[in-house]
Amino acid sequence: MRAVTVRGAWYAAGLALGAATAVAELLLTLLAGLSLLLVLAWPRGRRAVLRRLGAIAAGIADAERRRLSRFLGVRISDTYDDVRALRYVVARWPLGLLGGLVLFCMATGILYVGFGLFGWFFRGIDHPWAVVATGLAGFFLVFLTVQAVFGTALLEGQLAGRLLGPSHQDELERRITQLATSRAEMMDAVHDERRRIERDLHDGVQQRLVALGMLIGRARRSRDTERAGQLLLQAHEESRRALAELREVAWRIYPTVLDEAGLRAALETVAERTPLPVLLNYAVDEPPGRQVQTVAYFVVSEAVTNVVKHSGATRIAVTLRREPGARTLRLHVEDDGSGGADSTGGGLLGLAGRVAALDGRFAVHSPAGGPTEIIAELPCA
C-alpha cells in the first residue's frame, strides 16, 4: 500500500509538470499551424519553417522524455528525429491538459472532504445531511481521480512509446541484427566447446589410455611373474583414472543428473564438486523449460570454474530466483575474489552467447579489487 501511494504521488507530480509543459506545447502547435499556413504554397519556406519548429519540438521532447523517466518510470530512447518530435508535441498537449484537469478535480475532492470534516468537527451544523453528502462526494471524487492519475500516466507512456519510440521497421532491423549476432556468438561458443572437448580427450583420456596400453604390453612381455603383477596393478589403477577422467569430460559435456533430478540437483552437484565453499540459494517455485535449465546450469558451472581458476576467491554465492508467475529466471553468481574479469574473454563471451541464444540478458560487473558479479536473466515464457 505504501509503495502504491508513493508511486501515485510521483505520478501526480509528473502530471503536474506535464500540464505545465502542455501549455508550451499548445502554443507551439498554434504557432506551427499559423506558420505553415503562411508558407503553405512556398516549398522552400515550408521546409525552413518545419526545420525550425522541429528543433524547438526536439528540445521540448527531450524535456518530456526526462520527465517521463523521472516521475512515470517510462524509458524512451533518444533516437527520434525532429519530425517525430514535432508530431509528439502536437499530439501530446491534450493529454497534458487532461492530466492537469484530473489533478484539479482531485484537489476539488480533497477540499470537499476537508470542508465536510471541518464543518462536522469545528462548527455548528445546521444541515448535517448536506455536510455528509459533501464529504461523501469529495471522497468519491478523490477515488475517481486517483484512478485517473494512474490511467493518464499509462496513456502518457503509451503515447511517447508510439510516437518517440523506434518504428516497426527500426524494431525489425534491430531484432534481425540481434538474432544474427546471437547466432554467430552461439556458433563460436559451439566451436569453442568442441575444441575444449577435443583437448580434454587428447590431453587427458587419450594419454591415460596410451599409458594403460604400454603397461599391459610390458606386463605381457615380462618374464617375471611378480613384476608382471605389479604392472597389471598399475594398469588397473590407470584404467580407473581414465574412466574417472572420461566421466568428468562427459559431465562437462552434459550432466545426466540435469534430466534425471532437475536443475537444483545439478547445481548442488556442482557445489559439491567445487573446492571452494559455494552458497546455493535456489528460489524457483516453478521449474523452467529444459533449454532454460540447460543454459542456467552451464552459466553457473562455467562461472564457478572460472572463479576457481582465476579469481583467488575464498567463497562463491549462487542465487537463482523466479517469482511465482514471473516470466524471467534471474541468475546471480558472486565471489569475493580480486575482480578485473574480462567480459570479452573466451569463457564469459561463450556464456553471453548461450544466454543471447535464448533472447536473455547477460552482464558482468567486476571492478578491480572485486567482487565479481555475473548476472543472467533468462526468459521462461
Image (spheres, rainbow, N blue to C red):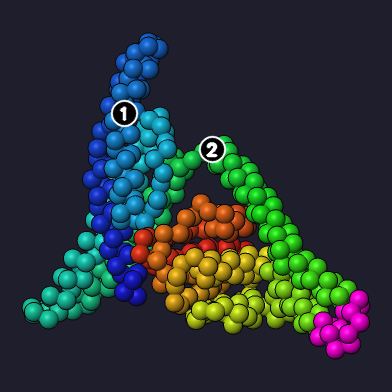
Q: Amino acid at mark 2?
A: Asp
Decide which of 93, 262 is in the foreground and name it.
Answer: 262
Residue 379 appears at what percent x and percent y? 58, 62
Q: Position of residue 182 (x, y in %)?
A: 61, 49
Residue at 74% from the left image edge and 78% from the top image edge:
241
**Overall secondary structure of the magenta stretch?**
helix
**CA gap, disc 2 and disc 1:** 22 Å
Residue 349 at what x, y percent from top left?
56, 54
Label 1's element?
helix
Residue 345 in magenta?
Answer: no
- In the depicted view, which residue is nearer to us: 70 or 229? 229
Q: Nearer the viewer, residue 288 or 203?
A: 203
Residue 341, disc:
none
> Is residue 10 positioned above or below 135 on the image?
above
Q: Position of residue 246 (x, y in %)?
A: 75, 72
User: Residue tagged by mark 1?
Assistant: 55
Q: Residues within 10 Å of mark 1 (few under 14, many from 20)?
A: some
Marker disc for residue 170? 2
Figure disc tally: 2
- Confirm whether the magenta stretch covers residue 230: yes
| Residue 127 placement: quadrant | bottom left
Figure quadrant of the C terminus: bottom right
| Horizontal side, residue 57 vs residue 221: left or right | left
